[in-house]
Amino acid sequence: MLLNEARLAACMKRDDLAAVVATAPENVTYTSGFWAMTQWIRRGPQAYALWPVAGHGEPVIVTSTATLDLVADQDAWVERVRRFGDFSVVSDEGELDPTSARQRALHELPDDGDALSALVAAITDAGLARARIGVDELGLLPGYWDRLQKRLPAATLVPAASLLRKVRAVKTEEEVARLRRAAEIAERSIAAALAIAREGVTELELARAFHTRTVEDDALPVLGCIGFGPRSALMNVQPSDRRLAHGDVIRFDVGGRYRHYRADIARIATLGEPGAEILRCHRALLAGVERACEIIRPGVRAATVFEAAVETVRRSGIPDYARNHVGHGIGLDGYDAPDLSPGSPDVIEEGMVLCVETPYYVLGRWGLQVEDMVVVRADGVESLMTTAGDIRVVG
């Protein structure tokens, strides 16, 4: 199970909730184990997971009939399902394989008509129609909150997106294992891209090598900011047909998705030896990441980590260094809690997985960035990286 069940129970008790309803894609997957593809690839499709406190029935997946094949083919730990809507499939009369048999059984469930009707039925069946329920507001279509409240007039509905974000911030060891693998795949993919780096190669060709390795390692492409020379200073650079020239900085801000979990790391390379200014600035950025990792431990304020990283970069060679954040949590979402920013109210907890980063962009010249993934342990951080953040010289 990916879900940190004890942490969810504690947060629900704190907020006096009898149940929570997950609606956003990452929260549905997190609470149920069900990956509703349609939610992840386009806006609008509805899928929910109802998670009641102990004594109020079993958790329930609420999803469209068109996604029942995914329910049947996945190892979701929530077994109860309510379906809504029409979708026609023809079933062979003979003996079916286990997945097909499970899908046929799911198709035989009653059709609740629409998403909200199915959710209301699940809540009512669990005896929660008069309960205080946390509802993740992020995945609901406009107007659905009011419609749900009208359908459950005796229930007290409270927003729960922030609660689920807080729960997701502390990872289980299974989540850490997936994040570690995602980071490793990103590093291997950078190495594959740099293996073809030579004068005249394009950003698109490096991106193709990067993403090919990602897929070969059983992950899926998500983030692929790869830029050369002045284009490396574009914060969200997308690969183009710009060709690599001697002296160029190559900036990678990249990561795929492995078994639903994200990587987000950054590394710098140069074609030929880097100049003195690039070396000075990069060393300062690396020092900032290293200092942040030195002080990260349970109980430390996220804002304190920000201040230490920025001050270290300034003191180490970039006096005017400025940032709005120096990192973030990562998991099913690329930007989980905590937020390592100056105004963040977050406090570091054991089990959080963080991306610690110090980008620096000089428009018209180059962009530099160090970004590592680490997991917070009782006595500090454990790096999920297998490579150092030093500049790599190619060519």
Image (cartoon, grey):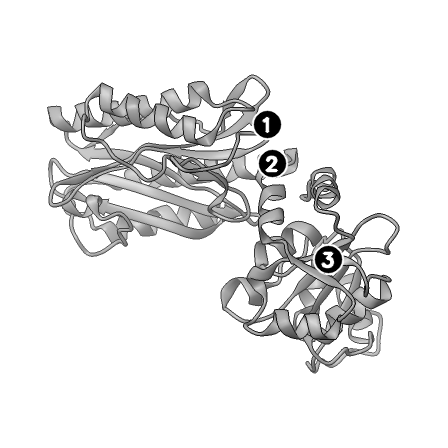
Using the numbered discs, state the Cα–Cα distance from disc 3 to disc 1 in whole angstroms: 28 Å
Residue 357 picture location, percent across and down:
36, 34
Q: Nearer the viewer, mark 3 or mark 1?
A: 3
Q: Tell me if 127 is positioned left or right of 47 in this view.
A: right
Q: Tell me if 153 is positioned left or right of 180 in this view.
A: right
Q: Which residue is label 1 attached to?
A: 350
Q: Which residue is label 2 attached to?
A: 170
Residue 351 picture location, percent across and down:
59, 30
Q: Look at label 1 and name its amino acid.
A: Glu
- Confirm or deny contact between disc 2 and disc 1 (CB under 8 A): yes
Say whether residue 102 is visible. no
Mark 1 or mark 3, which is nearer the start of the sequence? 3
**Image quadrant where one finds the C terminus:** top left
- Confirm or deny contact between disc 3 and disc 2 (CB under 8 A): no
Q: Quadrant of residue 232?
A: top left
The kind of secondary structure element at disc 1 is loop
Q: Residues within 10 Å of mark 2 (few under 14, many from 20)?
A: many
Q: Tell me if 395 is positioned left or right of 88 in this view.
A: left
Mark 2 or mark 3, which is nearer the start of the sequence? 3
Q: Nearer the viewer, mark 3 or mark 2?
A: 3
Say whether residue 113 is visible. yes
Q: Look at label 2 and name its amino acid.
A: Val
Q: Quadrant of residue 360?
A: top left
Q: Residues within 10 Å of mark 3 (few under 14, many from 20)?
A: many
Which residue occupies 56% across, 71% down? 141
Q: Of residues 265 and 309, which is closer to you in this image?
A: 309
